[in-house]
Amino acid sequence: MSEPEAQIIAIGGGGFSEGNSLALDAWVLGRARRDSPRVAFVGTASGDAQTYLDKFYAAFEKLGAVPAHLPFFRRTPDLRSFVVEQDVIYVGGGNSRSMLAVWREWGLPELLREAARGGTVLAGISAGAICWFEQGVTDSGAAGLESVDCLGLLPGSCCPHYDGEAERRPRYHAMLAEGRIAPGIAIDDEAAVHFQGGRARHVLSAKSGASAYRMQTTGGEVSEGRVDAEHLDVSQLDPGT
């Protein structure tokens, strides 16, 4: 039997973590291999902040999942047995550079690759979106937005919060034009891109006008191509109800 094509879902911003619609989070769960999927939250980028964990459990229990979380700042479980038994790994936002350093120290990247090959859906928001690419745009340090080397499960670069933070678009364009980051994809808040087998298959939106953009460079000139997004029905997925 052939291995399933690895699925990765990169979310630009919003969702359960910001008290918005759960439509994108529900769509992620819908890609899992079973009903009531086991979904593990990895909150390393926020230092395993308890408020973030509380929001995750409340949202994903509401969506009918079986939630758990992977701690790195308390007693950490046996990583391989924990990771490979999950149907979805969902990575939260925060400090991307620190998150990646912790993961590499623990050997998590190879386990994530193994899990994806076995059918586990890899997903995440903000830091949890860029981590899957070769490079990402991050504000982890005092210097502001800069590039960071990521896991390389997906080619090129990624910039989240593209419409949500005013400096994101001009800074990403400048880095691309100067050759300081590879061409890639930008994702608005409340939008997501679904990759399967390393190729973008769907762009989803839980907010009118939100989408994703293919970023390319030719001779130092940057081109930005907006991708039409499938708008999700959010009426039954309001976390406040």
Image: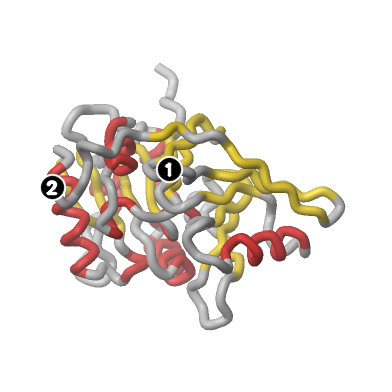
* Nearer the observer, 148 or 101: 148
Residue plotted at (45% across, 66% down): 96
Question: What type is the residue that disc 1 sits on?
Answer: Ser
* Nearer the observer, 172 or 88: 172
Question: What type is the residue that disc 2 sits on?
Answer: Thr
Q: Secondary structure at mark 1?
A: loop
Query: Which labelled disc corresponds to residue 195?
Result: none
Q: Are marks 2 and 1 in contact (CB under 8 Å)?
A: no
- Give the image location of residue 147, x and y in percent: 60, 65
Extreme-bottom residue of the structure: 142
Q: Is residue 26 above or below residue 98?
A: above
Q: Is residue 88 left or right of residue 98?
A: left
Q: How many badges with numbers are in the image?
A: 2
Residue plotted at (41% across, 58% down): 107
Q: Is residue 157 above or below residue 171?
A: above
User: What whole-number distance in Å separates the C-alpha atoms at marks 2 and 1?
Assistant: 21 Å
Residue plotted at (77% across, 64% down): 178
- Give the image location of residue 150, x and y in percent: 53, 58
- Give the image location of residue 35, x and y in percent: 19, 28
Extreme-front residue of the structure: 208
In the rendered structure, which disc, 2 or 1, sits on the residue that comes first in sequence?
A: 1
Which residue matches tag 1? Answer: 208
Residue plotted at (47% across, 45% down): 210
Q: Residues within 10 Å of mark 1 (few under 14, many from 20)?
A: few
Extreme-top residue of the structure: 1
Q: Residues within 10 Å of mark 2 (few under 14, many from 20)?
A: few
Does any portion of residue 111 appear in the rendered image? no
- Give the image location of residue 62, x and y in percent: 13, 44
Which residue matches tag 2? Answer: 241
